[in-house]
């Protein structure tokens, strides 16, 4: 049988730092930030329910939309990333060139511009719901970054793994599916988790195309009540709690994967 690859570390993306028990400083900071944010939010809605509690009651549907956009975009981005990553290491010049061009173009255009462009471009051809346009735009953008994560993960696997699989009678496709990709998944999990957190934060940009996410719902409340400071304080705390919660979940998953290596 083909043995496992050595542990690799890929530092890709600009998401939140993943708290690990091995990093005591970061782990402690995570606990202070997470429970501190919850404490502040509870204090505000208890001491001054108007407007803080009213704001919190106004935005739950926006939180749901934020999750819908984030989950839909990350799943589609992973698929695009896998196709792109395989293309980036492909010996087929056309496939490799197309994947490389996609990465270079998408990474060179700001996400906000991509959201506007895809929303209005799709609108010219077919009528697409704003939330679907947002998911597609976010996925197209993050698919390029995921492609580089996948490429780096595959290339981190020792070439001896491929040689050993081929010597056992596997062809190139079987080797990639049954030997390389399963090991690469363990390597790319941390950066994929990091990209998920970054995408969750960037999902606030979709509010500009009439998607009723958390930020847009907050803006609606603020424009009606003129409590801009209070509203954006609540929005910031909610985003912080959500991102810290998921960064912890990703950290736990990463630790379990590391144990099973």
Image (tube, rainbow, N blue to C red):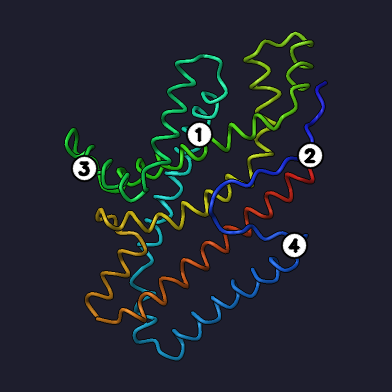
Q: Which residue is mark 4?
A: 23
Tell me whether the residue at label 3 lies in contact with that at label 1, contact meaning CB atoms closer than 8 angstroms: no
At x 79%, y 11%, the residue is 168
Q: Position of residue 247 (x, y in %)?
A: 60, 58
Q: Secondary structure at mark 1?
A: helix
In primary-sequence order, the first of circles 2 and 4 is 4
Chain-order first, disc 2 or disc 3: 3
Q: Secondary structure at mark 2?
A: loop
| Residue found at x 39% / y 86% | 49
- The 10 Å Cα crowd at callout 1, few under 14, some 14 to 19, many 20 or more, is many
Contact (Cβ within 8 Å) of mark 3 with mark 4: no
Answer with left or right where residue 24 lies relative to residue 124: right
Q: At x 64% / y 30%, what residue is drawn? A: 154
- Work out which residue is located at the far top of the displayed protein and give it: 169
How much space separates mark 1 and mark 4, taking CA atoms? Answer: 29 Å
Q: Is residue 120 left or right of residue 184?
A: left
> What mark, if any, has residue 81 been given in the picture?
1
- Which residue has dot 2 on it? 261
Q: Quadrant of residue 189?
A: top right
Image quarter (top left, top right, bottom left or bottom right) of the N terminus: top right
Q: Marks 2 and 4: which is nearer the front?
A: 4
Q: Quadrant of residue 258?
A: top right
Q: Which residue is mark 3?
A: 120
Against 125, residue 235 (above or below) is below
From the top left corner, tell me how far across and down residue 214 is, in percent. Answer: 37, 63
Relative to 164, does residue 60 appear above or below in the rendering? below
Do the residues bearing badges 1 and 2 touch, measured as CB atoms within 8 Å? no
Sequence-first tag of 3 and 4: 4
Secondary structure of residue under mark 3: helix
| Structural distance between the alpha carbons of marks 1 and 2 | 24 Å
């Amino acid at each position: 049988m083909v043995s496992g690859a050595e542990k690799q570390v890929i530092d890709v993306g600009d998401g939140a730092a993943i708290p690990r028990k091995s990093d005591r400083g970061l782990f402690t900071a995570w606990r202070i930030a997470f429970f501190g944010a919850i404490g502040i939010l509870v204090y505000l809605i208890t001491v001054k329910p108007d407007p803080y509690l009213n704001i919190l009651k106004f935005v739950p549907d926006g939180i749901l939309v934020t999750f819908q956009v984030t989950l839909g975009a990350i799943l589609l981005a992973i698929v695009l990333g896998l196709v792109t990553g395989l293309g980036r290491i492909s010996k087929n010049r056309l496939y490799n060139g197309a994947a490389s061009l996609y990465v270079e173009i998408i990474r060179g255009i700001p996400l906000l511009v991509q959201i506007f462009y895809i929303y209005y471009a799709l609108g010219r051809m077919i009528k697409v719901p704003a939330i679907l346009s947002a998911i597609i735009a976010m996925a197209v953008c993050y698919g390029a970054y995921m492609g580089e994560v996948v490429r780096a993960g595959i290339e981190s696997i020792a070439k001896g793994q491929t040689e050993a699989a081929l010597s056992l009678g596997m062809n190139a496709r079987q080797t990639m599916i049954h030997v390389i990709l399963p090991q690469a998944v363990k390597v790319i999990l941390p950066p994929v988790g990091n990209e998920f957190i970054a995408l969750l934060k960037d999902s606030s940009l979709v509010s500009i195309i009439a998607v009723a996410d958390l930020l847009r719902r907050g803006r609606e409340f603020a424009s009606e009540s003129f409590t801009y400071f209070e509203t954006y304080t609540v929005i910031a705390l909610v985003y912080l709690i959500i991102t810290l919660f998921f960064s912890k979940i990703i950290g736990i998953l990463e630790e379990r994967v590391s144990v099973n290596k």
